[in-house]
Amino acid sequence: MENMLETSNHFITNEGLTPLSVLLFRNIIYDYYASSGRDLPWRRTNNPYFILVSEIMLQQTQVERVIPKYELFIKTFPDLSSLAKAPTKLIIELWQGLGYNRRALSLHQCARIIVNEFQAEVPSDEENLRRLPGIGKATASAIAAFAFNKPTVFIETNIRTVFIHFFFRNDWAVQDRQLFPLIEQTLDHCNPRHWYYAVMDYGVYLKKTGNDNNRQSAHYNKQSPFQGSNRQIRGMILKYILTHPGSSENEIVCDIKSDYTAIKENLIQLEKEGFIITGKVGYQIAE
């Protein structure tokens, strides 16, 4: 069926995809999903708070690393109110191992805003979701689709891989603006939640079979190595302060054994961002 969609010249017109091409495309994606779809914990719930947590955790982080952290996080903070009241130190402790710790602070701030301004109910519209810290257009659209089954149009790496594979296989530097009309045309408005689950899983399948068409995107950026990176130093500093509260700058530098200038600069930046505080007693995780 995939070859039929690829080779026939009756499916693409100047106006876009024909109804038959949309049907064939959906059948390919749904057939794969029916036989090989992933069973992920955040797919077993329609709880908007749980889905909010999963979407922020999944930003730039692989599913396999997210699953245990997600399950521990929602067990520790089963609702928005418990997360909003939690000390920052505990949230950062639970976040250790996921990286990009700024997301932990954003999620904490999200919980407080939702509790105070939205009566502890995650907003269902993209406009209000985008007002929340750490939530951009794609994440807001994903939350609206997965938590509220709204037919939003968004793109992420697996979706991008699928649409380039089927419709731009021989092209390079493919722009997302070329993909959005096709994503919108093929969207299953009756069940957008499961449609996006299916498309993403097909993207994972393509990558596993060596067809990482995402590299053909104009927006493709290979992640820089973690070892020796600024991300690694930030994580080491936070982990050290969590386990050694009250440490001085010299103690942190001596024990971490990394570049002095990089550590000093990151201590300043982490304090500006609200992760840590310093005073007479040394560095502490902010409350």
Image (tube, rainbow, N blue to C red):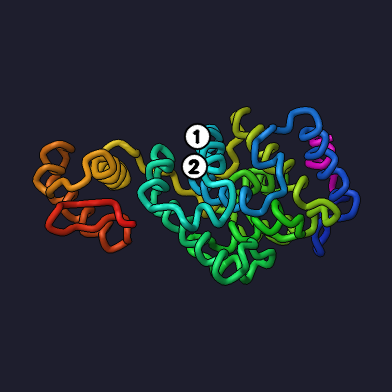
Towards the viewer: 186 or 44: 44
Disc on res. 15: none
Going by the numbered disc 1, the residue's amino acid type is Arg
Mark 2–mark 1 Cα distance, whole angstroms, equals 7 Å
Towards the viewer: 159 or 134: 134
Identify the magenta region: 1-9
Determine whether label 2 and label 1 are within 8 Å by CB.
yes
Residue 203 magenta-drawn? no
Disc on res. 61: 2
Going by the numbered disc 2, the residue's amino acid type is Thr
- Relative to 173, say whether 4 is above or below: above
Label the magenta part by its dominant secondary structure. helix
How far across and how far down the image is residue 252, in percent? 15, 43
Q: Is residue 104 left or right of residue 217?
A: left
How far across and how far down the image is residue 88, in percent? 38, 53
Residue at x 84% of width, y 50% of height? 22
